[in-house]
Image (spheres, rainbow, N blue to C red):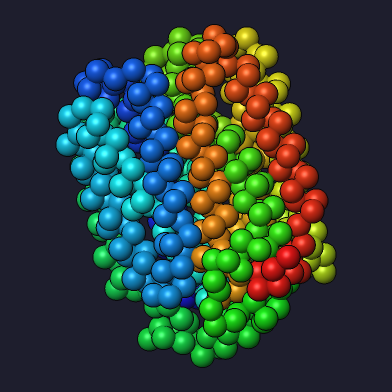
Amino acid sequence: MHKRHVLVSGTFLLSLLLYVDRVCISTAKQPIIDDLGLSDTQFGWILSVFAFGYALAQTPSGALADRLGPRLILTSVVAAWSIFTGLTAAAWNFGSMLAVRILFGVGEAGAFPGMARAVYSWIPVQERGLVKGINFSASRIGAAVTMPLLPVMIEALGWRQSFLVLMLVGFGWAVVWWLWFRDEPDQHPTISAAERDYILANRQAALAGPEANVATLPTATILRSGNMWLMMGQYFASNFTAFFCLSWLFPYVQQRFNLAFTEAGFYAMLPLLGGAVGNVFSGWLVDRFYAAGYKMASRRVPAVFGFALASAGLVISVGQAEVVGAVAWLTIAVFGIDMILSPAWSFCIDIGGAHAGKVSGTMNMAGNLGSAVVALAFPYLLAWTGSVETFFYVGAGLNAFGILCWLAVKPDRPITAAA
């Protein structure tokens, strides 16, 4: 097996674990609020502070991945978030849970920027779409399997002990990554000369060209880039839908349709599996367009189509009276919204080059500010209006805004050509 394919397997497992640990708190909502005496709005703040911590640490962690390399950064990131996963089990009230979860968010922040930097170094540009699709599909699979399986673990062990088990799994991944991975292909002791030369010759034949690889990239240069602001805007919009499925989907389905704990887990799993399929399909589509010579369309078309599907799915799902219809349309919405991930992250690697970590981290920062808004918007809009419809219509409108962003981006303009 080629070493870059082993890398993809490792980042697939990282992405899967990332979302198991992220979504487990949503799945464990009821036992946690019962044990700690929390309200729904307090639980919303617990979800939101994670997203704020995660968002605000994105750009700095991406810059560290560029400077120190993804070997050290990803090892440290997984070890750190695993510690805070374990410390979640020690929370005794609202304040202590808030403190642990914001630190958990900071700990997770370097994961995807670090992976983006590893992809830049190891994956030829013509293979990046599918690789990013596979990585992000793992995040949805991890979230999906958590929905039905964690309730079983909680019933067997309790929610606190379940978090401790997840901490140990994270430590195992960090050790294996540190022992196997190297920041550059030519540093790996067992890579073949043919594969090494192939990667080095093809990893930055990207849309933006070699001029993306200047020695330094000041934050001011990033913030002068029109491309960057458009990517931040569309990612904020996409996360409004995506983070709902990672935070409030399980309790929403359980409460709206009066389902048992384990039954709700099954239905909440289905949209996330739809997202996994959307990621792989979009990644395949990105690479097919690119191979056919439609380089700009390879980034733009999958994202525009995905946002359109997501808007339609949200609007139609909210009008369904039965759980099967509502979940089916939500699955279509999540399939669509996850089609955005591969082109968005491939775009950031294209324009960022050797600064892919910092550029993708800046986009992800904006996206997760959207996540923080969602975590609060869902319970507060429900409390203010007595209905979930407003939330879904806002999400559909933001997805339409995401389409406009993608129609305006210029994938052939490197981040260093700020405008």
Taking the view exactly as shown, the residue that stands out farthest to the right is 293
| Residue 81 image point, x, y percent | 30, 51
Identify the residue at image location x=58%, y=84%. Answer: 200
| Residue 118 image point, x, y percent | 48, 70
* Location of the C terminus (image quadrant): bottom right
| Residue 27 image point, x, y percent | 37, 29
| Residue 242 image point, x, y percent | 56, 38
Between 226 and 240, the one lying in front of the other is 226
Image: 215 above or below 407: below
Say whether residue 253 is left or right of residue 278: left
Query: Does residue 101 appear in this view?
Result: yes
Say whether residue 90 is left or right of residue 85: left
- Which of the 4 image quadrants contains residue 92? top left
Say whether residue 313 is left or right of residue 49: right
Tally the numbered discs: 0
Query: Does residue 173 appear in this view?
Result: no
Identify the residue at image location x=21%, y=21%. Answer: 35
Identify the residue at image location x=46%, y=56%. Answer: 58
Image: 44 above or below 87: above
Identify the residue at image location x=26%, y=41%. Answer: 100
